[in-house]
Amino acid sequence: MRDSQITVNGQLRDCGGAGPHTRLLDWLRTQGLTGAKEGCAEGECGACAVLLARPDGADRSRWTSINACLPPALAFDGQEIVTAEGLGTAPGPCAEEALHPVQREMADRGGAQCGYCTPGFICSMAAEYYRPERNAAGSGAAQTGTAVAGEEHATDHESGPNGFDLHALSGNLCRCTGYRPIRDAAYALGSPDGSDPLLVRQGGPAPAARPTQKTVDGARFIRPSGMEELFALLEQNPEAKLVAGATDLGVEVNLRHTRPPLTLAIDRLEPLRVLDVGSDRISIGAALSLTEIDRGLAGRVPLLSQLFPQFASPLIRNTASLGGNLATGSPIGDSAPALLALDASVVLASAGGEREVPLAEYFIGYRQSVKKPGELLREVWIPLPLAENTAFYKIAKRRFDDISSVAVAFAMQLDGGTVSSIRIGVGGVAATPIRATGTEQALAGQPWTAETAEAAAAVMSAEGTPIDDLRASARYRSAMLGQAMLKFYAETASAVEVAR
């Protein structure tokens, strides 16, 4: 069998020494590429960020920032990666000539002190630097590089006049530099030169996924060639761990030292990567990353458009999938409340066939679901038409890149100022994500008034069985449920006048 290989910084490297549980970060560091660091080992700090060439349609690719501390190196067999060391060019007469524009701006504007996190920041910043939408829609400053650090920016406090979206860095943490110099460096960037090799590379397709098999000390890693092989492997090995982005399994491997006997990579299987908007439903493949879903839906589902920016960070969203988030069965997974409010169903598939299960019936206990051994979550279905009034509220200790204490999603339809239908999904207040059915029943057929909302808030506060833990007390969680209802009313009260 052929050796596994990864193209890193333009050089093909043999990764035959990597085992099924060898992280991409560890393998890169064995190659002498020590810019990427381990900080948190759970995808929160971004010190390990690198760039990966991902498909952007059939004929183009897109440099995408990812955490290297979570996925196994073998998941990148045949793929292309760029680390902070590979961004610059070969040194010329002056050492500065070797710097990439992102590196130069970070250096000139004091964007680093100890430097531990700097390579990760630079990779995330480079992904935004090459983002096609930024360069296509950029202002004159973006095209010419004339942005001035420290000026009052033309758009808002989270986006620069050069089109740089500061949220691109929300998965990167810095403990000593302070974020202003880093922001200044980001806002000073122009657009890539037309001859920039990394920009030119985006004009070609991303590498196709390679079937991969590796066994070390009894542990196996397999990237199946297709669904038939995947189903056969699942039937023979129902305990196998399925990996798309490894944003959950990677944490288990790092912090709990989990060592699955068989890991199956499914992120590049085309039947699991569909995104189809039909006349009566939207079909979303379980292995699509959240970033790909958000870009593909292009605002067609407003509730998901509210959810995605609050889901972890771009580094996580660039690999995390809906299928993985639902399959873990976590009571604090952010996608479940929104999908419950959207009345979504999941399609479970196996060698024996497929079945549709309403998401409201999918979770049966803490991290447990109706999924049977040998089954996988293939698609998520969202019925159409969508409710006209929706909202997603996430209560967490940090605004971004944090786990929810409570998450609430609303989807309401009004008929002449009366609630004709409403669905409310809630996370963080029970052993599973739940529908707030008591509140839904209290609202059905009622006029959408302040009095109705206040009465519903009292019912909402009693939904679920919240507990005290490190993130929040049970009392606080209950209070936030009621406040979410009042906030939803405040934001949608004007819809009553429109409905009338």
Image (cartoon, rainbow, N blue to C red):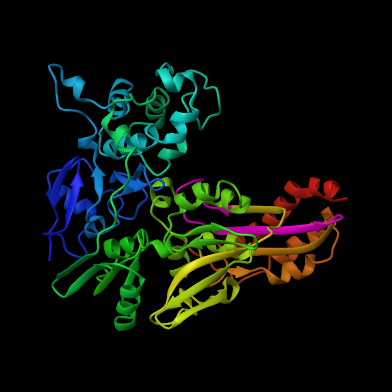
In the image, residue 282 lies in the stretch drawn in magenta: no
Query: Percent x, y for residue 237?
Result: 30, 80
Query: Percent x, y for residue 395?
Result: 57, 53
Camera-side residue of 439 and 193: 193
Which residue is painted at 33% across and 31% down in the image? 177
Which residue is painted at 50% across and 47% down in the image? 295
Up-down: is 221 above or below 181? below
- Quadrant, the N terminus: bottom left
Query: Percent x, y for residue 51?
Result: 30, 43
Up-down: is 32 above or below 133? below
Query: Percent x, y for residue 396?
Result: 52, 52
Q: Quadrant of residue 34?
A: top left
Camera-side residue of 47 and 214: 214
Up-down: is 444 above or below 235? above
Up-down: is 177 above or below 257? above
Which residue is painted at 13% across and 73% down in the image? 217
Which residue is painted at 45% across and 76% down in the image? 349
Q: Which residues are magenta?
A: 394-417
Label tally: 0
Camera-side residue of 259 and 88: 88
Q: Is residue 190 visible?
A: yes
Q: Horizontally, is 118 left or right of 93 in the view?
A: right
In the image, residue 398 lies in the stretch drawn in magenta: yes
Q: Is residue 402 visible?
A: no
